[in-house]
Image: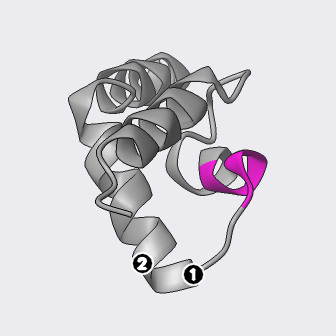
Amino acid sequence: MPGEASRARKTAATKAGADIRGEVLLTLAQLRLATPRQLKALLLPYQQDTDHVRRALRNLLAESPL
């Protein structure tokens, strides 16, 4: 369907904001161990790079009570 890929990219861009941080945390809790590339493939398949996922991981680490 025309425009469907564009909508998927817009959805990924929207998800790349604040929501991705929560999804990264939930995915890590389920998987226990994942690389930023694996998380990107699961959560942001249309993104070219792992910047959003890496930023979310750094933020979670900074807020970690450990």
Which element is circle 1 on?
loop
- Label 2 crowd bin: few (<14), some (14–19), many (20+), radius 10 Å: few
**Image location of residue 28, percent across then percent down:** 49, 69
In this figure, which residue is indicated by the disc labeled 2?
29
Circle 2: element type: helix
Query: Is 32 placed above or below 46 here?
Result: below
Q: Position of residue 29 (x, y in %)?
A: 42, 78
The residue lying toward the viewer, choosing from 44 and 24, is: 24
Q: Quadrant of residue 23?
A: bottom left
Residue type at mark 2? Ala
- What residue span does the magenta drawing correspond to? 35-39
* Residue 46, quarter of the rendered image: top right
Query: Residue drawn 37% across and 60% down?
Result: 25
Is 28 included in the stretch rendered in magenta? no
Mark 1 crowd level (few <14, some 14–19, many ≥20, 10 Å Cα): few
Disc 1 from disc 2: Cα separation: 5 Å
The percent coordinates of residue 1 (x first, y second) are: 50, 30
Please provide percent x and percent y for residue 11.
Answer: 35, 29
Residue found 48% across the figure and 16% down from its top:
6
Q: Residue at x 49, y 22 (%)?
A: 9
Q: Is residue 38 toward the left or the right of residue 52 in the image? A: right
Give yes or no for contact between labels 1 and 2 (Cβ–Cβ under 8 Å): yes
For the residue marked with disc 1, what is the amino acid? Arg
- Which residue is the site of mark 1? 32
**Predominant SS of the magenta segment:** helix
